[in-house]
Amino acid sequence: MLFVLLLAAGLAGCQPGPASGSAAPSASPSANRQQLLALGQEWVQCMRDKGLTRMPDAQVTEDGYLSFPPEDGYNWKEDASKHEDIIEACKAIEDRYPPNAFRPKQALTADDLRKLGEYAECLRTNGIPAWPDPSADGSFDLRGTTLANGVPGAVMDKAADACRSIWSGNVAVQDGRNGGGKK
């Protein structure tokens, strides 16, 4: 399963009833800011109702993309990745997001791949000797390694902190676990 440290903002959607007796917003490919915000907040409310009570409010960025900025240091993306049942319960809302709801991901450059290779070497040097080199897409495939069932959080945090000067962007990991883990 592909797990991204910083998951795309819309992990999933949910199916709560319409708020205040009005029809639930249905975003189209040309949803305006207000519709997009209403749909994002509907998803947030679903996630909260299903148990992720610290979900941050939805926001629309100045350039018109849906965002769920973390509050008080709470990593909602990591928390949500551990609750596939909640993600699935709220999936119907995310399915209604227009294609342009989120800022497009930028493709990795050759320099990014080189830096990810250096990052992998740094992680190996700083306590995770089994960490593999990145795949051509920039992800790290942990399947079939001693890391397939996860890296202890304290070990990963220490190594990642030591290597942050090399790579501080997203780290995509494929592992053998259902839902990934802190990477």
Image (spheres, helix red, strand yellow):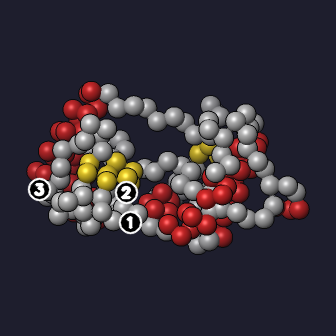
Residue 11, given in percent of the width and then of the height, sits at 53, 54
Residue type at the position of mark 2: Met
Q: Quadrant of the C terminus?
A: bottom left
Select label 3 or label 2 by which is in front: 2
Q: Is residue 15 left or right of residue 50?
A: right
Instruction: Give the crowd class for mark 1: few <14, some 14-19, many >=20 residues within 10 Å.
Output: few
What residue do we see at 46% from left, 36% from top? 105
Q: Secondary structure at mark 1?
A: loop
Return the disc, 1 or 2, that comes first in the chain's sequence. 2
Q: Is residue 31 left or right of residue 20?
A: left
Can residue 43 be seen?
no
Classify 46 as above or below 37.
below
Return the disc, 3 or 2, that comes first in the chain's sequence. 2
Q: Is residue 104 left or right of residue 165?
A: right
Residue 52, given in percent of the width and then of the height, sits at 57, 68
Residue type at the position of mark 1: Asn
Q: Residues at badges 1 and 2 in contact (C-beta under 8 Å)?
A: yes
**Cα–Cα span, label 1 and label 2:** 7 Å
Label 2 belongs to which residue? 1
Residue type at the position of mark 3: Pro
Label 1 belongs to which residue? 178
Label 3 belongs to which residue? 129
Work out whether residue 57 or residue 32 is closer to the camera in this orientation and state it: 32
Q: Secondary structure at mark 2?
A: loop
